[in-house]
């Protein structure tokens, strides 16, 4: 695990280093900056934004105070803006290159200023969009579904990421929107918490305001492992939420199977866990809560007779164009409803954000599932 962590840090430093070089190079060439001191100032600002986010993120995991919290919020916003600045400069180069093909060699400064302005405007819009939560309505026919559950509504919450940015007020907003749908049951498919240390006690009241007569069921994601399972359970134990950790809960002829994220930061095996659980009935209609929509694990769920798998994790990339990456990694299962015979899988875009409190090209969502 230590080797993987070191490798991850090394890759992150290389990627950020290369991206920082591109931004510095582009600003220098597009604005025709020749002053060495000006380039140094720009380089310091760029490095402060990118590596400052990593440093503040690390500090926020080991200490708790308002200054660190606000620095984390500011650095998260700045790293989001930096991403859009990076891509705006790529577009600026494309426009300048296209103009050169037509023999036009002027206007590069105006083009660059225009693209940087659009990056700032787009960043502001995406902060708004991150909190513009949508209700996603889907219907799922399930074989052998008891009459009791026909027409019943299950709400899926995923990737709420409660922590320094999405606090108690955000959770209360999510709870109010969820309760307004009058759910019969609520499922939380991981990353309820963001993985940062801090005072989580204020979250208990809004979590307890979630109401569902047939129960609230929860499995962990990778961010709960970052935070520490003991801290998670300390909060969950003070709520009405049922932590179904690698086990099955039967409810009026429907079974909820929950498989938590592995303590070794590896997704767990669906087939072996369900086969080992004496409470699991392969012939009973089943809703599986599993954080990551890995194609290989989805195949295991099908083999085990699961009717509906609910996942999250991907955020659909959260910021464009990272959707292209999640689509490749998860082979199209990174978002939306997928049907394979009688088996259904739904991957939510999530309701919260990680890092930059921004969303582009997708919406935060609360998923309302009507069983048929």
Image (spheres, helix red, strand yellow):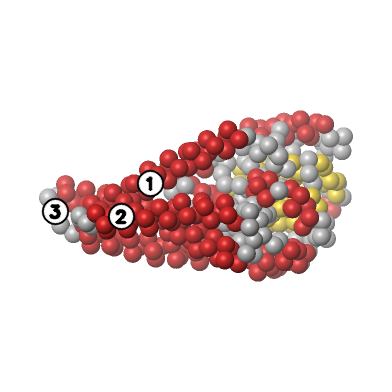
Examine the rendered structure and indicate whether residue 18 appears above or below residue 77.
above
Secondary-structure class at tag 3: loop
Mark 3 vs mark 1: which is more N-terminal? 1
Residue 232 coordinates in the image, percent (x, y): 74, 53
> Helix, strand or loop at disc 2?
helix
* Among the two numbered marks 2 and 1 on one chain, the one whose residue lies closer to the N terminus: 1
Foreground: disc 3 or disc 1: 1
Check if mark 2's residue and mark 1's residue have beta carbons within 8 Å.
no
**Alpha carbons under labels 3 and 2: distance apart:** 30 Å
CA distance separating discs 3 and 1: 28 Å
Residue shown at 65%/69% (left/top)? Answer: 169
Instruction: Identify the residue at the far left of this view.
Output: 103
Q: Is residue 200 left or right of residue 326?
A: right
Looking at this view, is 347 or 203 the one in front? 203
Instruction: Out of 180 and 271, give the one closest to the viewer.
Output: 271
Location of mark 3 (residue)? 104
SS state under label 1 = helix
Left or right of 152 on screen, residue 28: left
Q: Earlier in the sequence, mark 3 or mark 2?
A: 2
Choose between 125 and 70: the one closer to the eye: 70
Looking at the image, which residue is at 31% across and 51% down? 24
Q: Nearer the viewer, residue 349 or 18?
A: 18
- Left or right relative to 266: residue 152: right
Q: Which mark is residue 280?
A: none
- Residue located beneath label 1 in the image: 19
Closer to the observer: label 3 or label 2?
A: 2
């Amino acid at each position: 695990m230590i080797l993987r962590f070191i490798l991850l840090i090394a890759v992150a430093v290389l990627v950020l280093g290369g991206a920082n070089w591109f931004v510095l190079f582009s600003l220098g060439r597009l604005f025709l900056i020749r002053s060495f001191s000006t380039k140094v100032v720009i380089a310091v600002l760029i490095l402060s934004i990118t590596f400052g986010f990593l440093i503040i993120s690390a500090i926020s995991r080991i200490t708790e105070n308002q200054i660190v919290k606000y620095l984390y919020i500011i650095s998260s916003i700045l790293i989001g803006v930096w991403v859009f600045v990076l891509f705006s400069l790529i577009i600026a180069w494309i426009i300048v290159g296209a103009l050169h093909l037509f023999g036009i060699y002027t206007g590069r400064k105006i083009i660059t200023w225009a693209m940087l302005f659009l990056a700032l405007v787009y960043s502001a819009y995406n902060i708004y969009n991150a909190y513009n939560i949508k209700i996603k309505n889907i219907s799922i026919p399930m074989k052998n579904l008891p009459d009791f559950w026909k027409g019943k509504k299950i709400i899926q919450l995923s990737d709420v990421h409660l922590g320094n940015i999405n606090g108690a007020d955000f959770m209360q907003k999510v709870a109010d929107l969820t309760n307004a749908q009058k759910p019969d049951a609520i499922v939380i498919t991981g990353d309820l918490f963001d993985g940062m240390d801090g005072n989580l006690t204020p979250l208990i009241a809004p979590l307890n305001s979630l109401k569902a007569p047939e129960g609230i069921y929860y499995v962990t994601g990778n961010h709960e492992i970052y935070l520490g399972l003991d801290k998670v359970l300390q909060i969950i134990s003070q709520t009405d939420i049922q932590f179904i950790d690698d086990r099955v809960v039967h409810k009026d002829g429907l079974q909820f199977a929950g498989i938590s994220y592995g303590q070794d930061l590896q997704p767990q095996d669906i087939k072996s866990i369900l086969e080992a659980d004496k409470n699991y009935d392969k012939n009973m209609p089943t809703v599986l809560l599993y954080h990551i929509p890995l194609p290989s694990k989805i195949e295991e769920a099908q083999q085990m007779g699961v009717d509906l798998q609910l996942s999250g994790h991907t955020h659909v990339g959260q910021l464009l164009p990272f959707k292209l990456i999640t689509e490749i990694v998860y082979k199209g299962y990174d978002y939306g409803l997928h049907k394979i015979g009688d088996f259904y899988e739904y991957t939510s875009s999530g309701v919260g954000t990680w890092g930059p409190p921004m969303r582009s090209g997708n919406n935060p969502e609360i998923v309302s599932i009507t069983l048929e």
